[in-house]
Image (cartoon, rainbow, N blue to C red):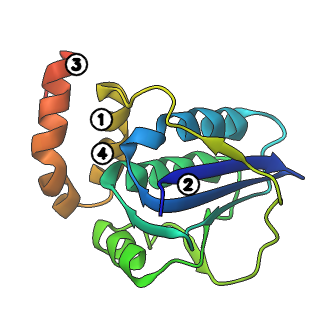
Amino acid sequence: MEEAIFYKDQDGSIYIRAQGHVTASICPELKAKAFARLDASPPPSAVYMDLGPCEYMDSTFLGLIVGINKRFRLKSPSPVVLLHVNDTCRGLLKTIGVLKLVELSDADVAFPPIMDRLGPGPRATAEFLLDAHEELSELSAENRKRFSTLTDTLKSALGKNED
Protein backbone atom coordinates (compact mmCIF):
# COMPACT_ATOMS: atom_id res chain seq x y z
CA MET A 1 0.00 0.00 0.00
CA GLU A 2 1.31 3.44 -0.93
CA GLU A 3 2.45 5.73 1.90
CA ALA A 4 0.01 8.60 2.41
CA ILE A 5 -1.46 10.94 5.00
CA PHE A 6 -4.90 12.50 4.60
CA TYR A 7 -6.07 15.50 6.61
CA LYS A 8 -9.27 17.46 7.14
CA ASP A 9 -10.33 20.12 9.63
CA GLN A 10 -14.11 19.97 9.68
CA ASP A 11 -16.96 20.65 12.11
CA GLY A 12 -14.57 21.52 14.93
CA SER A 13 -12.54 18.32 14.70
CA ILE A 14 -9.28 17.33 13.07
CA TYR A 15 -9.31 14.11 11.03
CA ILE A 16 -6.08 12.39 10.04
CA ARG A 17 -5.77 9.08 8.18
CA ALA A 18 -2.39 7.35 7.83
CA GLN A 19 -1.92 4.78 5.08
CA GLY A 20 0.86 2.30 4.27
CA HIS A 21 4.35 2.61 5.75
CA VAL A 22 4.27 6.13 7.21
CA THR A 23 7.72 7.71 7.43
CA ALA A 24 9.35 11.09 8.02
CA SER A 25 9.16 11.88 4.31
CA ILE A 26 5.46 12.76 4.50
CA CYS A 27 5.23 14.21 8.02
CA PRO A 28 6.32 17.88 7.74
CA GLU A 29 3.13 19.11 6.06
CA LEU A 30 0.99 17.24 8.61
CA LYS A 31 2.86 18.89 11.46
CA ALA A 32 2.47 22.34 9.91
CA LYS A 33 -1.27 21.96 9.28
CA ALA A 34 -2.10 20.23 12.57
CA PHE A 35 -0.03 22.57 14.77
CA ALA A 36 -1.44 25.68 13.04
CA ARG A 37 -4.98 24.44 13.66
CA LEU A 38 -4.24 23.38 17.24
CA ASP A 39 -2.90 26.86 17.96
CA ALA A 40 -5.95 28.58 16.38
CA SER A 41 -9.06 29.70 18.17
CA PRO A 42 -11.42 28.16 18.92
CA PRO A 43 -9.47 24.98 19.55
CA PRO A 44 -10.69 21.76 17.94
CA SER A 45 -13.00 19.63 20.06
CA ALA A 46 -11.40 16.36 18.97
CA VAL A 47 -8.46 14.92 17.05
CA TYR A 48 -9.06 11.57 15.35
CA MET A 49 -6.29 9.58 13.69
CA ASP A 50 -7.40 6.56 11.68
CA LEU A 51 -4.51 4.13 11.65
CA GLY A 52 -6.53 1.28 10.13
CA PRO A 53 -4.80 1.52 6.74
CA CYS A 54 -1.38 2.15 8.39
CA GLU A 55 0.88 -0.88 8.06
CA TYR A 56 3.92 0.61 9.81
CA MET A 57 5.03 3.91 11.31
CA ASP A 58 8.56 5.14 11.82
CA SER A 59 9.80 6.89 14.94
CA THR A 60 9.36 10.32 13.37
CA PHE A 61 5.65 9.73 12.85
CA LEU A 62 5.40 8.33 16.39
CA GLY A 63 7.05 11.52 17.68
CA LEU A 64 4.62 13.60 15.65
CA ILE A 65 1.67 11.76 17.22
CA VAL A 66 3.11 12.64 20.64
CA GLY A 67 3.62 16.27 19.60
CA ILE A 68 0.08 16.59 18.23
CA ASN A 69 -1.33 15.03 21.40
CA LYS A 70 0.77 17.32 23.62
CA ARG A 71 -0.35 20.43 21.72
CA PHE A 72 -4.01 19.29 21.75
CA ARG A 73 -3.91 18.59 25.50
CA LEU A 74 -2.90 22.20 26.18
CA LYS A 75 -6.48 23.19 25.32
CA SER A 76 -8.44 19.97 25.83
CA PRO A 77 -8.90 17.47 28.65
CA SER A 78 -9.22 14.70 26.04
CA PRO A 79 -6.33 12.97 24.27
CA VAL A 80 -5.96 12.27 20.58
CA VAL A 81 -8.05 9.24 19.59
CA LEU A 82 -6.25 6.58 17.53
CA LEU A 83 -8.72 4.46 15.59
CA HIS A 84 -8.46 0.89 14.28
CA VAL A 85 -4.82 0.34 15.27
CA ASN A 86 -3.48 -2.98 13.97
CA ASP A 87 -1.24 -5.27 16.02
CA THR A 88 2.00 -4.09 14.39
CA CYS A 89 1.30 -0.41 15.03
CA ARG A 90 -0.08 -1.15 18.50
CA GLY A 91 3.21 -2.88 19.33
CA LEU A 92 5.21 0.14 18.15
CA LEU A 93 3.00 2.53 20.13
CA LYS A 94 3.38 0.37 23.24
CA THR A 95 7.15 -0.10 22.92
CA ILE A 96 7.75 3.64 22.60
CA GLY A 97 5.27 4.55 25.36
CA VAL A 98 2.70 6.41 23.27
CA LEU A 99 -0.22 4.20 24.37
CA LYS A 100 -0.22 5.78 27.83
CA LEU A 101 -0.89 9.21 26.27
CA VAL A 102 -3.62 8.58 23.72
CA GLU A 103 -6.99 6.84 23.54
CA LEU A 104 -7.41 3.74 21.38
CA SER A 105 -10.79 3.02 19.84
CA ASP A 106 -12.41 0.83 17.21
CA ALA A 107 -15.45 3.13 17.04
CA ASP A 108 -16.84 3.98 13.62
CA VAL A 109 -16.08 7.70 13.61
CA ALA A 110 -17.53 9.32 10.48
CA PHE A 111 -14.57 10.81 8.64
CA PRO A 112 -15.17 13.43 5.95
CA PRO A 113 -15.66 11.74 2.57
CA ILE A 114 -13.13 14.08 0.92
CA MET A 115 -9.82 14.73 2.66
CA ASP A 116 -6.65 16.52 1.56
CA ARG A 117 -3.75 14.26 0.70
CA LEU A 118 -0.58 15.66 2.29
CA GLY A 119 3.03 15.34 1.28
CA PRO A 120 5.52 14.54 0.26
CA GLY A 121 6.05 18.32 0.31
CA PRO A 122 9.18 19.77 1.88
CA ARG A 123 11.76 17.31 3.15
CA ALA A 124 11.99 16.59 6.84
CA THR A 125 14.74 18.87 8.14
CA ALA A 126 17.20 18.01 10.89
CA GLU A 127 15.24 20.35 13.19
CA PHE A 128 11.99 18.53 12.36
CA LEU A 129 13.56 15.12 13.04
CA LEU A 130 15.13 16.36 16.27
CA ASP A 131 11.81 17.75 17.54
CA ALA A 132 10.02 14.45 16.85
CA HIS A 133 12.68 12.37 18.56
CA GLU A 134 12.93 14.70 21.54
CA GLU A 135 9.18 14.22 22.03
CA LEU A 136 9.78 10.47 22.19
CA SER A 137 12.84 10.85 24.42
CA GLU A 138 10.77 12.75 26.98
CA LEU A 139 8.53 9.70 27.46
CA SER A 140 11.09 7.44 29.15
CA ALA A 141 14.71 6.82 30.06
CA GLU A 142 14.60 3.85 27.69
CA ASN A 143 13.61 6.13 24.82
CA ARG A 144 16.34 8.63 25.74
CA LYS A 145 18.83 5.80 25.39
CA ARG A 146 17.16 4.38 22.28
CA PHE A 147 17.31 7.70 20.41
CA SER A 148 20.43 9.26 21.99
CA THR A 149 22.75 8.64 19.05
CA LEU A 150 20.27 10.13 16.61
CA THR A 151 19.41 13.16 18.76
CA ASP A 152 23.10 13.81 19.52
CA THR A 153 23.94 13.63 15.81
CA LEU A 154 21.10 15.96 14.90
CA LYS A 155 22.04 18.43 17.65
CA SER A 156 25.61 18.41 16.40
CA ALA A 157 24.49 18.99 12.82
CA LEU A 158 22.36 21.91 13.99
CA GLY A 159 25.14 23.36 16.15
CA LYS A 160 23.18 22.88 19.36
CA ASN A 161 24.86 22.07 22.65
CA GLU A 162 24.34 18.51 23.77
CA ASP A 163 22.70 17.97 27.16
Disc 2 target residue = 69
- Residue with the mark numbered 3: 158
Q: What residue type is labelled 4?
A: His
Q: Which residue is drawn at 72% across and 83% down?
A: 107
- The reply to whether callout 3 and callout 2 are in contact (CB within 8 Å) is no
Query: Label 2: few (<14), some or many (≥20) within 10 Å?
Result: many
- Residue extending farthest to the top is 159
Image quadrant assignment for residue 123:
top left
Q: Is residue 163 visible?
A: no
Measured in 3D between alpha carbons, the distance from the residue under mark 1 to the one under mark 2, in whole angstroms, is 17 Å
* Residue 155, image quadrant: top left
Q: Is mark 4 on a helix, strand or loop?
A: helix
* Label 2 – label 4 distance at C-alpha: 15 Å
Secondary structure beneath label 1: helix
Q: Which amino acid does label 3 sit on?
A: Leu
Circle 3 crowding by C-alpha within 10 Å: few under 14, some 14–19, many from 20 = few
Q: Residue furthest right?
A: 11
Residue topped by disc 4: 133
Which is more foreground, mark 3 or mark 2?
3
**Nearer the N terminus, badge 1 or badge 3?**
1
Q: What residue type is labelled 1?
A: Leu
Residue 3 on image: x %, y % = 47, 54
Q: Where is residue 136 in the image (x, y as percent from the top left)?
A: 32, 53
* C-beta proximity under 8 Å, tags 1 and 3: yes
Question: Would you name the residue on which mark 1 appears?
Answer: 130
Mark earlier in primary sequence (3, 4)? 4
- Residue at 90%, 53% (x, y): give it: 11
Judge from the rendering whether residue 41 lies leftward or rightward of residue 158; answer left or right.
right
Residue 42 image offset from top left, x and y in percent: 84, 40
Density class for disc 1 (Cα within 10 Å; few <14, some 14-19, many ≥20) is many
Question: In the shown orientation, is residue 126 left or right of residue 16?
Answer: left
